[in-house]
Amino acid sequence: MNQLFEALLFGLLTVLVGTIVAFLIGFFFSTDLPPVCKDWNKNYVMETSLFFTGVFAYLISVLIKGSS
């Protein structure tokens, strides 16, 4: 249960870092997009992907560490 909690925290950390990095990259490499593009992220697809990436990356690292 402790590893699951740590995996969830790692997933949240991944979302936080990924969002900050995306903001910085967007700031330095910004482009003018049409207004319709504002609705593209209404389901938070990037954030959800980053969260599960962090959770699975943590769990895989625990499995690799545990098998060695």
Image (cartoon, rainbow, N blue to C red):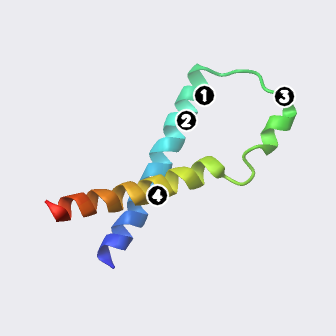
SS at mark 2 in the image: helix
> Looking at the image, is mark 4 or mark 1 earlier in the sequence?
4
Please tell me how crowded label 3 is: few (under 14), some (14-19), or many (20+) other residues with Cα within 10 Å: few
Residue 68 x %, y % = 13, 59
SS at mark 4 in the image: helix
Residue 2 x %, y % = 30, 75
Q: Which residue is mark 4?
A: 12
Please tell me how crowded label 1 is: few (under 14), some (14-19), or many (20+) other residues with Cα within 10 Å: few
Q: Pointers 1 and 2 in contact (CB under 8 A)?
A: yes
With 20 as the anchor, is 42 left or right in this view?
Answer: right
Residue lying at 60% horizontally and 28% vertically, measured from the top left: 26
Quadrant of image for the N terminus: bottom left
> Looking at the image, is mark 3 or mark 1 earlier in the sequence?
1
Mark-to-mark CA distance, 2 and 3: 19 Å
Mark-to-mark CA distance, 4 and 2: 15 Å
Q: Which residue is mark 3?
A: 34
Q: Which residue is mark 1?
A: 26
Q: Which residue is mark 2?
A: 22
Mark-to-mark CA distance, 1 and 2: 6 Å
Q: Pointers 3 and 1 in contact (CB under 8 A)?
A: no
Please tell me how crowded label 2 is: few (under 14), some (14-19), or many (20+) other residues with Cα within 10 Å: few
Residue lying at 19% horizontally and 59% vertically, measured from the top left: 65
Mark-to-mark CA distance, 3 and 1: 15 Å
Mark-to-mark CA distance, 3 and 4: 30 Å
> Looking at the image, is mark 4 or mark 2 earlier in the sequence?
4
Residue 52 x %, y % = 49, 58
Which of the numbered marks, if any, corresponds to residue 61? none
Say what amino acid the circle numbered 4 marks.
Answer: Leu
SS at mark 3 in the image: loop
With 55 as the anchor, is 44 left or right in this view?
Answer: right
